[in-house]
Image (cartoon, rainbow, N blue to C red):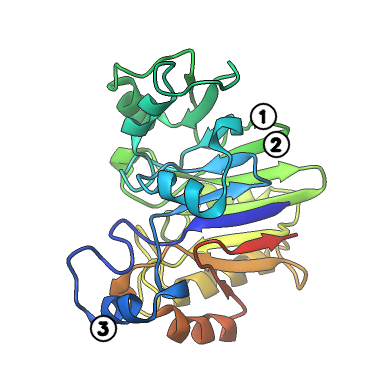
Amino acid sequence: MKLQYLGTAAAEGIPALFCNCPVCTAARQKKGKEIKTRSQAILDDTLLIDFPADTYMHALRFGVDLPSVHTLIITHCHSDHLYERDFWCRNPHVAHDIDEKPLAVYATAAGCKKIAEMTVIDPHRTAVHEMAPFVPFEAEGYRIVPLKADHDPATDPVFFIIEKGDKTLLYAHDTGWFPEETWDFLAHYDRKFDCVSLDCTCMLVEFREGHMGLAACRDTYARLTEMGLCDETTVACVNHFSHNGNATHEQFETEAANCGFLTAFDGMTVEF
């Protein structure tokens, strides 16, 4: 599998739109990895994960062939993960000379409702499918298991186990410390994770509800390892950062490495 991080920030981005804190100021000055857009990833250039307003820029910057992407999974319906207005851009009078296979969008009930309210979306070009926690489904040759997340309950939040062949990814954004139902499910899960990507929105700040900081990520990964789901061959990453985490990318990269994590940046690719 190949996981590419297209955007690695929380909702406000880094630098945040109207902020002059030290982290945002450093990002504007240094640019490069310090610039972080809203969270999105793509697996094997095929399976798109989340759909922020920055999707357009991600496609341009990283050469994502969006007309050829036919599967999208949504973690939750906050606008930095689901910007449903841009599905209008797949309508026939806007998107020309593309194949007639629809974009299959998988979302929980709150996300499906949000998309349905956009009545100008052509259902022949964008087909919406409702998913639920702990109910596996198959798409594009992947077996996907949504897991219940600890995040705003009004958004029906989930994160994902994604399997293909003998490879398995745990993509855990946005979430705090996993709910007990999710830990119970994982206790009976019988595959090892080849890659784990954990929410680290709060970075150096201690936080475990709704999002996590580095200490919570360390403890989460330790518990996964104790359960036999991770080992020394697992690629471990942290992702989804806020300027409120009180560290630049350069500063945080060292702290994360000391805990055994790679620090995601926009465009970073990991293969496993």
Residue 181 visible? The answer is: yes
| Quadrant containing the C terminus in the rendered view | bottom right
Going by the numbered disc 2, the residue's amino acid type is: Tyr
Which residue corresponds to mark 2?
142
What's the CA distance linking mark 1 and mark 2? Answer: 6 Å
- In the image, which disc is placed on residue 22? 3
- In the image, which disc is placed on residue 138? 1
Secondary-structure class at tag 1: strand
Residues at marks 1 and 2 touching, judged by CB atoms closer than 8 Å: yes
Residue at 63 percent of width and 51 percent of height: 186
Residue at 53 percent of width and 51 percent of height: 41
Q: Tell me if residue 137 comes above or below residue 81 in the rendering.
A: above
Task: For label 1, count other residues whose C-alpha is less than 10 Å away and answer few (under 14), some (14-19) or many (20+).
Answer: few
Q: Tell me if residue 216 comes above or below residue 115 in the rendering.
A: below
- Give the number of marks: 3
What's the CA distance linking mark 3 and mark 1? Answer: 44 Å
Q: Nearest the camera: 264 or 259?
A: 264
Q: Nearest the camera: 152 or 268?
A: 268
In-image side of 37 versus 223 (left or right): left
What's the CA distance linking mark 3 and mark 2? Answer: 42 Å
Secondary-structure class at tag 3: helix
Residue at 43 percent of width and 41 percent of height: 51
Going by the numbered disc 1, the residue's amino acid type is: Glu
Task: For label 3, count other residues whose C-alpha is less than 10 Å away and answer few (under 14), some (14-19) or many (20+).
Answer: few
On the image, the x and y values in percent for residue 23 come to: 30, 79
Q: Tell me if residue 51 comes above or below residue 239 in the rendering.
A: above
Q: Tell me if residue 237 comes above or below residue 149 in the rendering.
A: below
Residue at 46 percent of width and 77 percent of height: 215
Secondary-structure class at tag 2: strand
- In front: mark 3 or mark 2? 3
On the image, the x and y values in percent for residue 83 come to: 34, 38
Q: Earlier in the sequence, mark 3 or mark 2?
A: 3
